Amino acid sequence: MKRKYTPEMAQDRLQSLARLPRQVFVGMDVITGFPGETDADFEDSYTKLVEWPWSRLHVFPYSERQGTPATRLPGAIRPEVRAELAERLRRLSDQRLHQIYEAAVQAGQVGEVLWEGRGRDRVEGREWWTGHTPGYLRVWMPAEEAGLIRNRVSDFRVSGLHFDPAAGEYRLLGSIS
């Protein structure tokens, strides 16, 4: 796709971010089924992604855009194959993100959280304060446990993990410590 970087350059950048003293959330866009991509190419990419330190993948199958040079490339891949490859990478991304959140639960303390606003649980109707850690982990705390904390930073103690299938996101549950 005429990228100006190599896989080795990407790996070096990711490893340098992983060495930082605080957790960094690294999201990457990945296209599957680009014309000419072979099974070996995909497996090589998959292996690298398993090994590299990233947080979440934004995966989508290649789609033709009329008039672009890629539509003239040989080796077109059937749409159903593109979709299968994308789903495989999405599962890998979900597994990685789950591991990151589980590690935060095991640690019990994620440090500072920037409180961004209030939200309502769609199932129970309960109100929550929502925010993010510096490592971009989403946290929720029952609204009744704090006054007006929007745009404030406080330490946070983790008590559990919740996955909201409707939103497709993990949330650390807990309280201000």
Image (cartoon, rainbow, N blue to C red):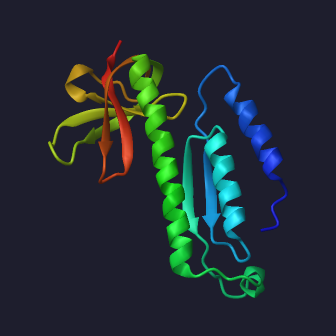
**Which quadrant of the view contains residue 61?**
bottom right
Q: Position of residue 83 (x, y in %)?
A: 51, 71
Residue at the far front: name it: 40
Q: Is residue 62 visible?
A: yes
12 displayed left or right of 113: right
Q: Is residue 109 above or below residue 58?
A: above
* Residue with the most extreme left position: 124
Question: In the picture, residue 161 is in which quadrant?
Answer: top left
Asked if residue 137 can be seen in this view, the reply is: no
Query: How many numbered dots are placed on residues in this image?
Result: 0
Left or right: 127, with 9 as reference point: left
Give 59 or 65, whichever is nearer the viewer.
Answer: 59
Q: Residue furthest top?
A: 177
Q: Position of residue 32 (x, y in %)?
A: 62, 67
Which residue occupies the foreground of this view, 124 or 52? 52
Q: Quadrant of residue 148?
A: top left
Q: Residue at x 70, y 56 (%)?
A: 44
Quadrant of the snapshot with the N terminus: bottom right
Q: Quadrant of the C terminus?
A: top left
Q: Is residue 73 left or right of residue 173?
A: right
**Does 63 appear above or below 59?**
below
Decide which of 113, 29 is in the foreground and name it: 29
Residue 127 in the image: x percent, y percent? 21, 36
| Residue depicted at 72% across the width and 85% down the height | 71
* 82 lies left or right of 39: left
* Image position of 58 with respect to 98: above or below: below
What residue is at 66 percent from the left and 19 percent from the top? 21
Residue at position x 85%, y 58% in the image: 4
